[in-house]
Image (spheres, rainbow, N blue to C red):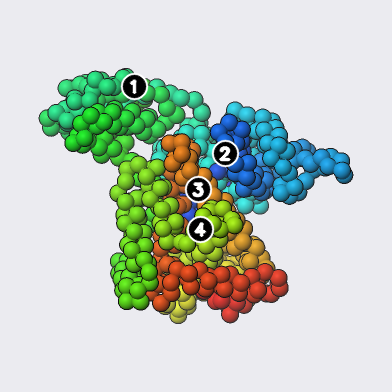
Amino acid sequence: MKQGNLEKWTDCKSCENLLLFSELVNELLFDYSIPSNRVATLNSHFLCLDAMSAITGIDNNGVPEGTLKPIAEELFNALKVDPVFADLETTPLNYFVKNDKRGFRIIDNISELNYLELKNAITSIHTLFFCEYKYFDNLKQRIKTIIITNDTHQQLLLFRLVKSLLTEIINIGYSSQYIYYVMDSCYWNPQTSINKPNQIDLFFDNFSLKNKDFKVVFIVDKSKIYKYMHFSHNVELHDSLAIKTGMHKESQFINIRKKKSFITVDTKALDFYSAAKNARTLLSLDISIYRLYNHEYRYNINTVKCGVYEENTFYRVSSPKSAVSHKKMPSNKKIQESIEISQKALEVACKKSYYDLPLTLIKAIEFHSHSLDSISKENQLLDFWAIFESVLNISNEHTSDRIQQVCMYLVPILKRRYIYSLFEQLTLDIKTYSEEEYQNIIVSAKDKNEVVQKICEFVLLKDHQGLRESFLLRCNHYPLLKERIIYYSDKLKDTKEMYNFVEKHADRVKWQIMRIYRNRNLIIHNGKSMPYLNLLIENLHSYVDEFIEYVFVSISEGNTIETMCQELFIKECQWNAKFSKNRRELNADIIKEILSY
């Protein structure tokens, strides 16, 4: 997270919840936020649509009925905690009904329901609670009420609503770049002062949920582009364009060409970034058609300069970032350390003649590189997923499904550093906020792990409660940082709470892996994918990098894949034995043990 420009915020106290909203949206959309602090792939609404899609596949396309179970489980859990439905007398959960010898009853575990019962429940919920834009309207109203009343006791509720709102807006079809642009122009670089909480309307006024007309312009090399123009529709090629809006950035765009021409595409979209994406997709398809018959032709429309007209306004639109690029790069020191570990892993595998392990590791490296280089989202996902299946010992003769085997290995790896990652990020957030406050907390700690330990102790231990409360009073202009510290302090009170927190994250990871696998199957068997593919790939990239790091470290220490997995299962047993049952008050030693898990 980062604190925004408060120059135009003249009454932060009266607008504290609006400020929290602004800071949270910024963090959720920031390219280099850790996965836990990014936009969720699906909310209750789109989980329901995902379930409806699975039902269609089961009823019409021969998809196994078991496909619905994990989606329904995730939907059920999402509905349980969805604040949109908290105050309703009849909630969506009431529709999960079982009829057996005990009569009709509302169940609290979806494993009790068969496929037909799940189908009826989900179809009813979709019709009654998620038709058209009903869910968006409910989210909008709840958020506006909390912000306008400025009740700071409802900040955790606001946090959950805003996360769901961004997932809703993006899955409806708005570009995340556009949402970021709206936030910047409304709150971080506004033309007027921000001093009233009802200025939340500045944000929502930009989301009518209606398509608008746009004209997208590309500056192109005519000698390369004209070859396929006869395949295109609603596309025109121009040797020159007249200035239309008189805006300075338009003049700069039109006049920078050197022996270039212009392509214009008329399109409808929700926002100008999405309009540019639509136009690029259309032209890329035309290029692909031409390349069916001319295999030597190359032209990447994603790299050419682009502008968009919306009535009398002109926007410059930068080249799109690939989904695999939304990840913060490690330091040069960390890169060098990782290279040394990977080299050692390959050397150990070769020296010990571990069957085909050296080739397996090399293939994983190559798949990763292919994914980074690909401009196709579908290929990015397939190459990343191939790493899991090429490294792990997935058996077709196993009693459980392939995806269950993948989850059995992956989830323990991906959950193991969860608490550490949260406090590592919080450490950076506090340091960015105030170097002085940061130094007061970490005292003399220098080693990175010791520093994270100090921050964790400061947030969680009762011994630091007085210092923590004083700190919170001093960061009123940074409500997101304040809210996060309060949230961790409340949710991670003892070992049992810590364990439950990690296991809930493990469930979310498992559901996400299964969703990635379903999309992998859609791509392979049907040539299709779900509209949230970008968000899936961002998560998958993080999973793959963490998995590869774990594998290379383990192999470099002399393990095979089989012994690595067995050690992983042993650690899982130890984690469960130490923290799943007994409830102990946290102290420095317990925190150190949990952070090192």
Residue ranking furthest to the right: 102
Total marks in image: 4
Check the picture and name the quadrant holding the C terminus. bottom right
- Frontmost of labels 1 and 2 is 2
**Residue 517 disc label:** 3
For the residues labelled 3 and 1, the Cα–Cα distance comes to: 36 Å
Residue type at the position of mark 2: Val
Q: CA distance from mark 2 to mark 3?
A: 14 Å
* Left or right position of 368 against 57: left
Report the Cα–Cα distance between label 1 and label 4. Answer: 51 Å
Against 245, residue 366 (above or below) is below
The mark that comes first in sequence, 3 or 1, is 1
Residue at disc 2, secondary structure: loop
Task: Tell me residue 306's x, y (percent).
Answer: 28, 33
- The residue pinned by badge 1 equals 266
Q: Nearer the viewer, mark 2 or mark 3?
A: 2
Q: Secondary structure at mark 3?
A: helix
Q: Is residue 204 left or right of residue 52?
A: left
Q: Residue 323: image x %, image y %? A: 39, 46
Task: Name the amino acid, label 4.
Answer: Ser
Please rate how many residues cluster around mark 4, counting C-alpha atoms within 10 Å: few if below 14, some from 14 to 19, many from 20: few
